Image: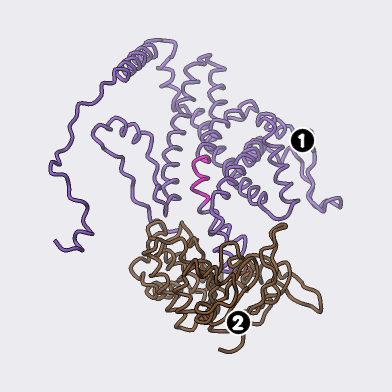
Chain colours: A brown, B purple
Amino acid sequence: MSESMIKAEGVHKRFGRNEVLKGITLDVAAGEVMCLLGPSGSGKSTFLRCINHLEKINAGRIWVDGSLVGYRQKGDVLHEIPEREVAREREQIGMVFQRFNLFGHMTAVQNIIEAPIKVRGTKPDAARAEAKVLMDRVGLGDRLDAYPAQLSGGQQQRVAIARALAMKPKLMLFDEPTSALDPELVGEVLDVMRGLAADGMTMVVVTHETGFAREVADTVVFMDDGVVVESGDPVAVFENPQHARTQAFLSKVL
Amino acid sequence: MADADQLSEPAPAPAASVEIKAVPVRRPGRLIAGVLIIVVAAALVKSVATNPRFGWGTVGHYLFAPTVMEGLVKTIELTILSMIIGIAIGVLLAVMRLSPNPIVVAASGFYIWLFRGTPVLVQLLFWAFIAALYPVISLGVPFGPAVVNLDANTLITPFVAVLLGLGLNEGAYMSEIVRAGLLSVDEGQEEAAKALGMRRMMTMRRVILPQAMRVIIPPTGNETIGMLKTTSLVSVLAYTELLYAVQLIYATNYKQIPLLIVASIWYLVLTTILSIGQYFIERHYGRGTARSAPPTLLARIWQSFSTWRHTRVEVPEISRHGQ
C-alpha cells in the first residue's frame, strides 16, 4: 500500500445547528478497504457523502488522490470550484447507495452505459460491450434488459455496483449497501464486493456487516457521535476493543 | 418425500378442492338503478330523435361544410401550438422554480401569479389590443438604442395574439403540473446521477424529467382537452376557429341549434381522439413500472360487467420501446 487515496483532516459538518461530524481525521491508502462502523446517527454516511462532495463540509479538508475535494486553494483562500469540475471529480469516485437508486426508466444495461456515453463520451457500442462484461462480473449476464422493478433487491444492488464500475473509478464508496436487503440476498452483494476488494479496488464501506468487515477490511474505523472513537486492524478492534463505547457497540452487534 | 421438496412445495391442498359455486347475494338496488337509467335514456333518445327542432338534416348538411372544416383545422392548429408553447414555458418555469437562484425563483413565481390570477379571456383581449399599449415593438439594448422597430399591428397578427394569449396562460398551469412531476421523482435518482459525474441540466433531462413524465402526462392530457375547448373563447376576437365558423353560418341562416350541434360533434370527436392518444403516451412513459398501463374507460366498464366471472383486465406487458 502506497500513498493515500483519501486524506481527511479535521472534517466538520453541520446541518443547521446539529453538528454531525466533529473533526474527522483519517487516511485511506490506495488499494485499502476501510469499513466504517458505528451506531446510526454517528455520522458514518455523512462522512462518506462528504468524500464525493454530495455534502459540503463546514471545516477541515478532504483530499482524494491528492486533490482537494470541492475547492481550490490559492494561498490561504479557498475557492469553490464550478459544477463542471465537481462533476469531473465525482466521475472518479464510484458510489453505491443503500436504496440502490437505479434509474427506474432504464434497463440494467441502459443504467450502466448512461454515464460512460453521456459524461465520458464513450462510443455506445464500446459502452455496451463493457456493460456486458460488468454484468457478467456481478453475475447478471442474463438480465441485461431487465428494468429495475423486475429485479430483486440484491440484483438491483449488483447492477448499481456495475453502474459505478463502468466509470472506471479509482475509489468506491459503499453507503450501507446491504441494509435494505432481505437477509438471504445480502450474501450475493457481499460476494461481489469481496471480488472487488481482491482485485485491489480502494473501498470505503459503511456497513453493519461485522462479519464482512472482519474478513475483508484492512482497517476498521469505529465512529460514534461524529468522531472516530477507535480504528485499526479488524482483528485488534473486534477482539480487543480499547474504548468503552466500542466495547458497548460490539457487544450488541456481535 | 424429500425435505427439499417439502420446502419448495405449498402446503398440501385441502382434500375437497371443488370450485365454490355459491348463490350470489341478491342486489335489488342494482337492478332498479339499471332499469331506471335505461328508461330515462330511452326517453331521451326518443325525444332527441323525434324533436324536429334538433334539425338533424341540417346537422348532416353542415357537418362537413367547407367553413366548418376550415374552422376545425384552425381549432386543431391552435390547440397543438398553444399546448406546445404552454408545455415549453411550463417546463422552463418549473425548472426555474427549483433553481438555487432566488431571483430566478421569484421571476417564475411572479409569472405564475400574473397569468393564473387573471382570466384567460381578459388576457386574450389584452393581446388583441396590444397595439394600443405598444404601437411599436423595438428590439435592442435595454434602456439603450433600438436595433429593430416593428409595427405591433403587423407583428401581432390575430393568429399570434390568440396563440400568445392561450399559450402564455397555459404555461402557468403547466408549470405547476411539471413541478409536481419533478418533485415526485425520488431524490436518490438525482444523487445517483450526481455521483456518476452528471451535471444538473443533464440529470434533469436524462434522469428526472423522463421519470416525472409518468406523473406529468395524465394532467397534461386533461389540460390538452381543456385547451381544445378553451380555443372556442377566441371566437370573441372574431378568429375563425370551429365555434366562430358555425356562428358565421348561423348568423346568415338562423339555424343556431343544429350548427351548435355540429360544433359539439367535432369537439367530442377530437376529445375522444385525444383520450385514446393519452392512453398510449401514458403506457410509453410507464415503462419500468409495474402499474404501467391504466385500463381504458371501456375496459373498466367491461371489467365491472364481468366481475362475477372473475375476469381481470389484462395489464399489457411493460413496453420496451427504445428511448
Query: Disc 1 residue type?
Result: Ala
Badge 2 sits on which subunit?
A
Query: Would you say B72 lies left or right of A8 here?
Result: left
Query: Would you say B139 lies left or right of B285 here?
Result: right
Q: Which residue is mark 2?
A: A5
Position above or below: B265 against A230: above
Q: Magenta stretch: residue A73 in it?
A: no
Residue B302 drawn at (x, y percent): 31, 33
Residue B120 drawn at (x, y percent): 65, 31
Query: What distance separates the C-alpha of mark 2 from that of mark 1?
Result: 67 Å
Judged from this view, the residue extending furthest toward the bottom is A2
Judged from this view, the residue extending furthest toward the right is B144
Query: Would you say B89 lies left or right of B264 here?
Result: right
Query: Disc 2 residue type?
Result: Met
Q: Nearer the viewer, mark 2 or mark 1?
A: 2
Q: Which residue is mark 1?
A: B131
Badge 1 sits on which subunit?
B
Q: Callout 2: 10 Å neighbours few (<14), some, many (20+)?
A: many
User: Which stretch did the figure color magenta?
Assistant: B212-220
Question: Which element carries disc 1, helix, strand or loop?
Answer: helix
Q: From where the camera sits, is residue B179 visible? A: yes
